[in-house]
Amino acid sequence: MKHNSAILGYGAYVPRYRIRTEEIARVWQGGGSGPNKMKAIASQDEDILTMSYEAAVQALRMAGSGPIQAILVGSESKPYAVKPTGSILSDILGFNQTLAVDLEFACKAGTEAMQMISGMVSSGVIERGLAIGADTAQGRPADDLEYTAGSGAAAVVIGRRNGNEVARIEYSVSYVTDTPDFWRRPTRPYPSHLGRFTGEPAYFHHITSSVKQLLSDTGLKPEDFTYAIFHQPNPRFPVEVGRRLGFTDAQLRPGLLNEIIGNTYSANTLVALSAVLDESKKGDRILLASFGSGAGSDAFVIEVNSKPDDDGYIPLKERLKNYIEVDYSIYARWRGKIRK
């Protein structure tokens, strides 16, 4: 799908609180060391609405004044089962004459929102929209997911190209199949997963399929990209899929954040995109490929145009250095793992 839209502003919010993987393993007596060092966790007064707001404010400030005619929020951990997060956020931000929609597709709900907003802008239906991905940790105690399931949010203001945009969305491809690698029933507090499906045929098959189709459609090669961002369920998978597709470690490294913040699910690739845009320069080309269990992948070609005009903006990686560690008892209480 060819796009004619632009990223006018972006923002990411990652909670300050962290729990180390070794602390989780201590409680469960070595139940698993986990592949990352630590993960970010939402505090007791944080959920996807508060985190989305923080990310959206950054993105809107960077984008400058103008209407927001669509707010799409992708998440698998909404505070309400039946009540849209998008409408609450639209009221808080002051954009009431807007389309407000909540989206789900596991970890690719954020890029799903981005693709839809870009499509509406490219077709002339709207001038500007806000795409958001946000999630909180939802790993069952002692489960493998508990070692990697982190919290965070990212927001992107997408609008018409004006010559001063941060980046241009050039092309996208989506690839989906019915692959039952990860799911959560309505009455269950934690997701279930089939570990033997996680890598193949889930993660690797879908990302390689979307990216190969993208490269075929556009005629681009891995060496034509300055950066490559892949969904990060753990530190190993994005590096491995990147190498399979012909990308170098130098292209992958700037976007790798899983080891220190965990898997932020619907926000995952958009948080990494924020980190990459922070250090990119005009003319850099970015490949962005998400993955959502169930399963599917969205792949994008994004070309950087200019640095954001926001003197007060602090790069994401600088903000990630300022964190507070908590023990398992605090983490369990905040995330509702102790049930009456």
Image (cartoon, grey):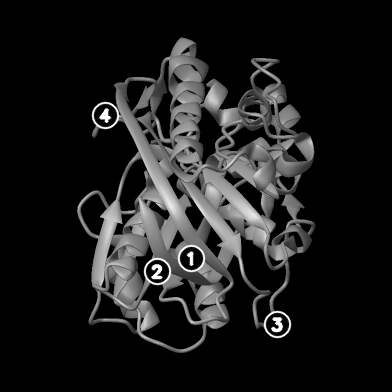
**Secondary element at tag 1:** strand
Which kind of residue does numbered mark 4 sit on?
Answer: Arg
What residue sits right under mark 2 in the picture? 130
Percent across and percent down for residue 179 are 33, 20
**Secondary element at tag 4:** loop
Percent across and percent down for residue 68 are 35, 79
Which kind of residue does numbered mark 1 sit on?
Answer: Val
CA gap, disc 1 to disc 3? Answer: 17 Å
Which kind of residue does numbered mark 2 sit on?
Answer: Leu
CA gap, disc 2 to disc 3? Answer: 21 Å
Residue at the bottom extreme?
65
CA gap, disc 4 to disc 1? Answer: 30 Å
- Vertical placement of 325 versus 143: above or below? below
How many discs appear? 4
Indicate which disc, 2 or 1, sits on the residue closer to the N terminus.
2
- Vertical placement of 61 versus 6: above or below? below
Residue at the front extreme?
219
Indicate which disc, 4 or 1, sits on the residue closer to the N terminus.
1
What residue sits right under mark 4 in the picture? 185
Residue 24 falls in which quadrant of the image? top right
Percent across and percent down for residue 227 are 68, 48
